[in-house]
Amino acid sequence: MKAIKSKNFILTALTGFGMLTGGLLLIFGGALSEIRAQILLAGVVIASGVAAAFWLRGVGKLKIARLIAENPILHINTAVISDLSGEAAQPEKNENTEVIVSYFGILLGEKIIKFNQNGIRLRTVEIGADFISFTYGTEKRTQNIRLLRPAINPAMLEQISEKFRYETGITPTLLS
């Protein structure tokens, strides 16, 4: 989620900078009759338009990521990467890849896998000894994602299965 927010911030800054530069070129560029100034203005307008389009796309992605993060069924920390060299061996330097599963999809780091939106439906959930598998897709295209998970006690596994059944209407298949 942090990566999505930071990309949106950068794209917002680029869009604002492009709009500001274009406006300043129009206001103070008295020599806009020169071909070089017109090419520069066109380049700035096109670049800020492209940045704005990516920013708007990122806003949509951020909305879906927030929807997934605010309605979790399952939250897994898949990997923790720490820098253990010399003086940098501090707990604040940990990088954690997290997976959040909700009724609306899966947030895998900064990658979003949507389901139960836009015709994409969650079809099956299978829980194995060390993984959870999700099959989702449309009528024409079906995909599967398998997430590795830590060992969970049987009571917690039953609780997670009940959450999936209650939230999605799909009873997970428990594999041994």
Image (cartoon, rainbow, N blue to C red):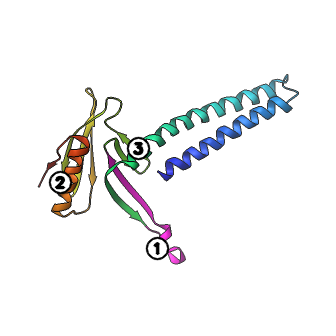
Marks 2 and 3 in Cβ contact (< 8 Å): no
Residue interval drawn in magenta: 82-102
Classify 77 as above or below 89. above
| Residue 43: quadrant of the picture | top right
Give the residue type that dot 3 points to.
Leu
Of labels 1 and 2, earlier in sequence is 1
Q: Residues within 10 Å of mark 1 (few under 14, many from 20)?
A: few
Q: How many marks?
A: 3
Residue depicted at x 35% and y 30%: 118
Q: Nearer the viewer, residue 95 or 163?
A: 163
Residue 149: give x, y in percent of width and height: 26, 58
Residue depicted at x 32% and y 37%: 115
Of labels 2 and 3, earlier in sequence is 3
Of labels 1 and 3, earlier in sequence is 3
Residue ID for mark 3 = 67
Q: CA distance from mark 1 to mark 2?
A: 33 Å
Horizontally, is 138 left or right of 170 in the view? right
Q: Could you say whether the residue bearing mark 2 is in a helix, strand or loop? A: loop
Magenta includes 113? no
Residue 56: give x, y in percent of width and height: 54, 35
Outermost residue, left direction? 176
Residue ID for mark 2 = 128
Q: CA distance from mark 1 to mark 3?
A: 35 Å
Q: CA distance from mark 2 to mark 3?
A: 27 Å
Give the residue type that dot 2 points to.
Gly
Q: Could you say whether the residue bearing mark 3 is in a helix, strand or loop? A: helix
Give the residue type that dot 1 points to.
Leu
Disc ID at residue 8: none
Residue depicted at x 19% and y 57%: 157
Residue ID for mark 1 = 84
